[in-house]
Amino acid sequence: MFEQLSGRMSKVFEGLSRGERLSEGDVTEAMREVRLAMLEADVALPVVRSFVSKVKERAVGGEVLDGVSPGQAVAKIVNDALIEALGGAGAVPLNLSAPAPVPYLLVGLQGAGKTTTAGKLALRLASRERKKVLLASLDVQRPAAQLQLQQIAEQVGGRTNGLVTSLPIEQGQGPVEIARRALDTGRREGFDIVILDTAGRLAIDEALMDEVRQVRDVAKPVETLLVVDAMTGQDAVNTAQSFKDQIGLTGVIMSRMDGDARGGAALSMKAVTGEPIKFTGSGEKMEALEEFHPERVAGRILGLGDVAGLVEKASEQLDQEEGERVAKRMLAGKFDLNDYVSQINQINRLGSISGILGMLPGMGKLKDKLAGKDLDTSIFNRHKAIISSMTAQERSAPEIIKASRKKRIALGSGTSVPEVNRLLKQFSEMSTMMKRLNKMGGLSGLMRGMGGAGGLGDMFKGMGGPGGRPPFG
């Protein structure tokens, strides 16, 4: 989401001249470019003015330390100002200290992703905090909205040993009656959290606000969380301001942060509404809800990466036991196509390769060089299809796959014999390389350093880079 802004910022800092002090001319020119970059990113004009003024005031006349370029000095000042604009360092946690059941109210416009976010939030609370969560849909406007939340609750409940469930649907009840019943059920059945998913509208109107106010007065929520679609840019900020003024908010959850919007809504939200962004959502998967860390977002905007976020994501998404199992097989020289599929699944859990690169320091230029190349993991899914068309014996001993078997596998997987050949050839080369590394003692060290995720580096080798090719392609 912040790629365009990040690219412009990097060019600004590179353009600063060298010297022992930051001149007013250099800073003024840099801030002109920063201002344009922020406006292009759809940041609210008052926020841009305040931001540029603060940075200029701190930067002009500032001494440049030995070994630090003027660009790096300004980047540090801009980084601090970005963190401040985004809400200050550190994520703002949910209030879990109120007497159970703690009511959370989700509000927002139709299509912002409230219902999906309710499921994501319930999964997070159940899996991380071991809270028993009741989901209740108050949306009697949208057909099948209550059924949708019920299905999400069943999905999440199955992954949390029943810690998440939904309020039984009773036809004919209004939002206020459903809210009362949800809170009563929460008290009687020992729930820790009750999440109330309110109805939305295509636009803010008095009927919507009246309905939400009535629910708020009955539920007395500890958290009133506005779900906004980050793709709507400044409209998201305007929506937040309206709900803040008329309902009162304790925080914001921004959905679709993986989209291609310009990112200005996130930079404007805290300054305009005074309320923190508590979470961001990206994708439809239930686990795709992350705490909002302003310092990490600022780092990504300035090309400093988000190593802490990447490590956290890896620890949450990767199956460590499975990684260690595959690592032991690699060390023993027994890596086969079953293990390769396991590694594909590990990669897919981390998301797109572009997303991973964006979290690594200094990778902005590399991403630019790879623009337009195949940076997604779709090719891995074709490999999974090919491997799934093999017999158990073929997956364990790929060397037995000859012409007739290749034709059968290609037909069964909807691919071609050349694709099967490429997969087998690359797999053979990777296996040979692993055996050589192991003999030299290199693979053992690599496995220890990667916590059992070995083999991924080779799988990414040549991924669309200059003169390179997609993995196994």
Image (cartoon, rainbow, N blue to C red):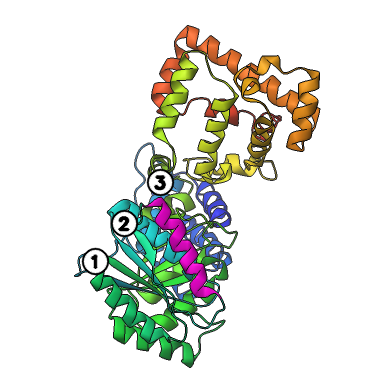
Element type where label 1 sits in the image:
loop
Comes first in the chain, label 3 or label 1? 1
Q: Report the mark closest to the observer, 2 or 3.
A: 3
**Does the magenta-highlighted stretch encompass residue 156?**
yes
Can residue 265 be seen here?
Answer: no
Frontmost residue, 43 versus 428: 428
| Image location of residue 347, percent across then percent down | 53, 37
Q: CA distance from mark 2 to mark 1?
A: 35 Å
Which disc number belongs to residue 309?
A: 3
Which disc number belongs to residue 89?
A: 2
Q: Amino acid at mark 1?
A: Gly
Q: Quadrant of residue 170?
A: bottom left
Which disc number belongs to residue 443?
A: none
Element type where label 3 sits in the image:
helix
Please identify the quadrant where the N terminus is shown: bottom right
**Residue that mark 1 sits on:** 190
State whether residue 19 is above or below residue 473. below
Q: CA distance from mark 2 to mark 3?
A: 14 Å
| Image location of residue 404, percent across then percent down | 80, 21
Q: Amino acid at mark 2?
A: Ala
Can residue 381 be seen here?
Answer: yes
Point 33% across, 76% down: residue? 182
Q: Specify whether 245 is left or right of 459.
A: left
Q: Which residues are magenta?
A: 144-160
Frontmost residue, 261 versus 62: 261
Q: Specify whether 419 is left or right of 246.
A: right
Count up the numbered dots.
3
**Does the magenta-highlighted stretch encompass residue 119?**
no
State whether residue 385 is above or below residue 22. above
Point 54% across, 37% down: residue? 345
Comes first in the chain, label 2 or label 3? 2
